[in-house]
Image (spheres, helix red, strand yellow):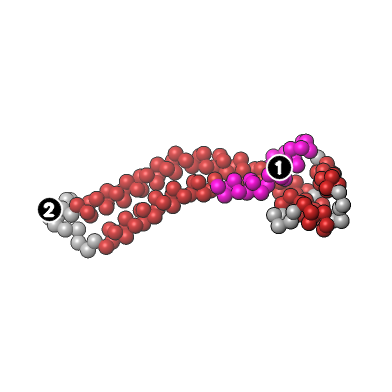
Amino acid sequence: MTRHNTIYTLPVLRNEFRALRDLKRERKTIIKGYTLPLKTLGDKLYKTKQDLEKIKSPGISDGLGGFVKDDNYNYLIQYKDELKDEIQRYIWINYSKYWEDMCECNARIATVYYYLGKMNAMDRKFIEDFYINEKLNKREVMERYNILNPKSLYRKADNIFRKLL
């Protein structure tokens, strides 16, 4: 279970709910930023392995199994080893930063869902419609809950949040 933060003030809680969509996008960006170079290196490694399999015979050897005179074959083997080392080096350098960023983002998302879990069903539905549901805008939420004034919409959300604090 991902840890969540404890929030003590209304403005901070409200901002966490407002930021949820952006936090989800941020998490996707973090994942993409970490995995894209790995995928690129993995694709190069796969292509190199495929090229190695296409070579039927390594060429002329010294008979002892040590030296192969086919430069392309030797180059591909060396390139494959370099790619493996580069992948390991990339993971070694970036793994802790990736998980640090992910844990921070996941903790904030878990905080929102923790407080959603503490709400009763009607309040949760209203907050989800108002802050989380991307398909509904403010006017549609006002119509759905028979609210005439936008200030009343925010007041209702603040009252729900106050119950949690």
Q: Which residues are magenta?
A: 1-29
Please state if 50 lies on the left or on the right of 74 as rendered: right
Q: Is residue 50 visible?
A: yes
CA–CA distance in space, label 1 to label 2:
68 Å
Report which residue position mark 2 lands on.
62
Q: Say the numbered circle drawn on residue 122.
A: none
Whether the magenta-drawn stretch holds residue 3 is answered as yes
Q: Residue furthest left?
A: 62
Q: Amino acid at mark 1?
A: Glu
Residue furthest to the top in view is 9
Vertically, is 74 above or below 89?
Answer: below
Q: Residue at x 72, y 41 (%)?
A: 15
Residue 88 horizontal side relative to residue 5, left or right: left
In screen coordinates, is 2 left or right of 74?
right
Res. 16 mark: 1
> At 86% across and 47% down in the image, what residue appears?
152
Whether residue 7 is visible to the viewer of this picture, yes or no, is no
Disc 2 is placed on an element classified as loop
Q: Quadrant of residue 49?
A: bottom left
* SS assignment for the magenta stretch, majority: helix
Tell whether 78 sits left or right of 116. Answer: left
